[in-house]
Amino acid sequence: MSDDHTRVRQVRVPDGIWAAYGRVCSKLGVNRAGDLVDHMRARIREHGSEEDIADLDRAEEELAERRSRKGGRPPKGRAEGQADDG
């Protein structure tokens, strides 16, 4: 991760699953993007190789450094990826 931004990624998900997942995330007070990223982190920590975990750690450090320059994490409701939750 050498670019100074988080890239938009696409996933193919049936509409019914996406809608239900959005409602569940809303009920939990999280957004889909953040919940998916948290899931990826957990999977990498649980099942990743040393290289995978090192990549995750570097990405987390880069994200923390970028957020510190920009004034921190976006406020709830405007969190990263929220606009794409459709």
Image (cartoon, helix red, strand yellow):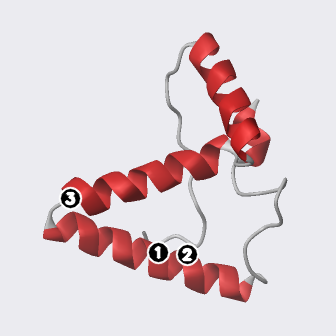
Residue at image mark 3: 48
Q: Position of residue 74 (x, y in %)?
A: 78, 67
Q: Position of residue 77 (x, y in %)?
A: 84, 53
Q: Residue at x 53, y 42 (%)?
A: 9
Is the residue 16 above or below the residue 6 in the image? above
Name which residue type carries label 2. Answer: Leu
Residue at image mark 1: 60
Which residue is outermost to the left?
A: 49
Q: Position of residue 11 (x, y in %)?
A: 50, 30
Marks 3 & 1, CB-CB < 8 Å contact: no
Marks 1 & 2, CB-CB < 8 Å contact: yes
13 sits to left or right of 50 = right
Distance Cα–Cα, label 1 vs label 2:
5 Å
Mark 3 secondary-structure assignment: loop
Q: Residue at x 41, y 51 (%)?
A: 40
Q: Earlier in the sequence, mark 2 or mark 3?
A: 3
Name which residue type carries label 1. Answer: Glu
Q: Residue at x 60, y 66 (%)?
A: 5
Mark 2 secondary-structure assignment: helix
Residue at image mark 2: 63
52 sits to left or right of 75 = left
Image quadrant occupied by the N terminus: bottom left
Distance Cα–Cα, label 2 vs label 3:
20 Å
Dividing the picture into quadrants, the one containing residue 31 is top right
Nearer to us in this view, 28 or 40: 28
